[in-house]
Image (cartoon, grey):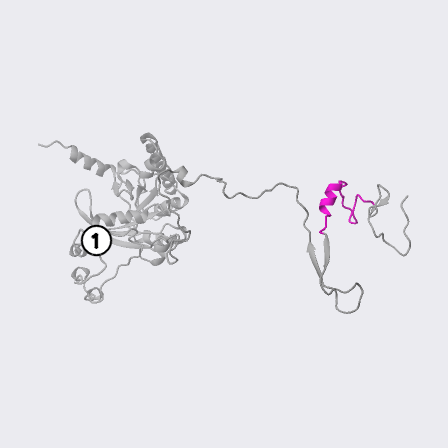
Amino acid sequence: GEPRFPPSLPFPQFPFDTNRGYCMATNPTYDEFGQYVLDDDEDVAEESEEVEERVVEGEGVHAEGDEGSPATMRVEQQEPESKEPDTQIILQKEMFPSAATVYPGAETMVQDEDTQDLTQPIIAPISKQRHDLTVDQDAEPERATTAPISAKKVPQKESGIPETTFNKQFLIGMLDHPEMIRNVALIGDLHHGKTSLMDLFVEHTHLTPQKPRFTDTRMDEQDRRISVKCSPMSLVMPALSGKSYLLHLMDTPGHVNFSDEVTAALRLADGAVLVVDVAEGVGLQTQRLLVHAIQQQVPLAVCLNKIDRLVLELKLPPADAYHKIRQVLDELNTIASQAAGGLLEPATSPAPTPASPTAPLQPRLSPELGNVCFASSQFHFVFTLQSMARHYGAKAKPAR
């Protein structure tokens, strides 16, 4: 049975093993904490080996127990003799081949790790190109007068305004003819190429090359690389017939948080160009802008931008690229048909005007109707089927 402990000891002083019936403290196999101890004499001797101490008597040492100056003692530790073989590391042994062995005849240069100057960063920051359009303060303040626009004079000194392919006096003279003016809004989803398309128009109408993202004049726009405010620009560009028109182009933001800028631009615009990334397709913001433009009865044209991505990134053959473009146009026509009430007017109907409450519906978007163009801002080209046919038709025309 279980052993009885005296009343003076309410709890046992040593752990008790109920299976064996004896106290583990008295068993040499277990220690006072109940942990198992090996029975091997050699292992116990290695773990419990103590350093022997030897007392060496020095000069003037009194007998043990005498009163007086204490005995002078020197304690030395006697290290046990090691029976294991010598395992020292041999530094002369070559563990890896040297550079001369691997690359015979090559010049080896050994440099310190921190050879770069502390003033030079390890990773250089991206250089930000900032630009702004300013007018010289010494110029004549003719623009603040109340005279007609055509009678105003261009300041003699202007700084920051680049030279254009058209004359500024010709541009000012066209302001007196409203029938020669077109207000066009560039709308589209974020990063679909509206600002890059505007840069392409700037490149074709300016003599000197300009910086990219020319219409992003705000510092936050240049830092974030997105358009925050609507940026208008007046350009004189010719049509296919050779007749020049004054275009007030409005580069609108594509982010959904700045949709108010797009709404204000559509109220002022005579027409809108919906820029769509043909590789990404029709997104949610593109659908909203398409429906909003149709509800505002603004004539639409579609610009399928970044068509170079079909070849360079997606690596589509011509047949697959054609079906991809057709799929995007079919999706746009489906959304436009639902927003217009289920029907699309043919291209032979007159163009709708925003002021007319009984304006006809949006014509169907199709390249053969002239309201779809193809562009690549990276490779600097924009064309329609009509402009492409005229360009190559003139080249293929036989000489008389």
Rendered location of residue 23, percent (x, y): 84, 46
38 left or right, relative to 293: right
Check if residue 50 falls in the magenta segment: yes
Residue at the left extreme? 400
Q: Nearer the viewer, residue 351 or 75?
A: 75
From what the image shows, is residue 55 above or below residue 279? Answer: below
Residue at point 66% right, 44% down? 82
Rendered location of residue 55, percent (x, y): 73, 57
The magenta stretch spans which residues? Answer: 27-51
Rendered location of residue 125, percent (x, y): 37, 54
Res 356 seen here:
no
Q: Magenta region, mostly helix, strand or loop?
A: loop
Q: Nearer the viewer, residue 109 or 231?
A: 109
- For label 1, the crowd category at 10 Å Cα-Cα, with few meaning under 14, some 14 to 19 and many 20 or more, is few
Residue at point 40% right, 43% down? 283
Residue at point 72% right, 54% down? 53
Q: Nearer the viewer, residue 169 or 131?
A: 131
The residue identified by callout 1 is 178
Res 171 seen here:
yes
Query: What amino acid does circle 1 point to?
Result: Pro
From what the image shows, is residue 191 above or below residue 325? Answer: below
Rendered location of residue 126, percent (x, y): 36, 53
Question: Which part of the image, by quadrant, shows the N terminus?
Answer: top right
Check if residue 8 falls in the magenta segment: no
From what the image shows, is residue 65 above or below residue 273? Answer: below
352 left or right, relative to 65: left
Question: Which part of the image, by quadrant, shows the C terminus?
Answer: top left
Badge 1 element: helix
Residue at the bottom extreme? 68
Kindly indicate the quadrant of the structure image that contains residue 365.
Answer: top left
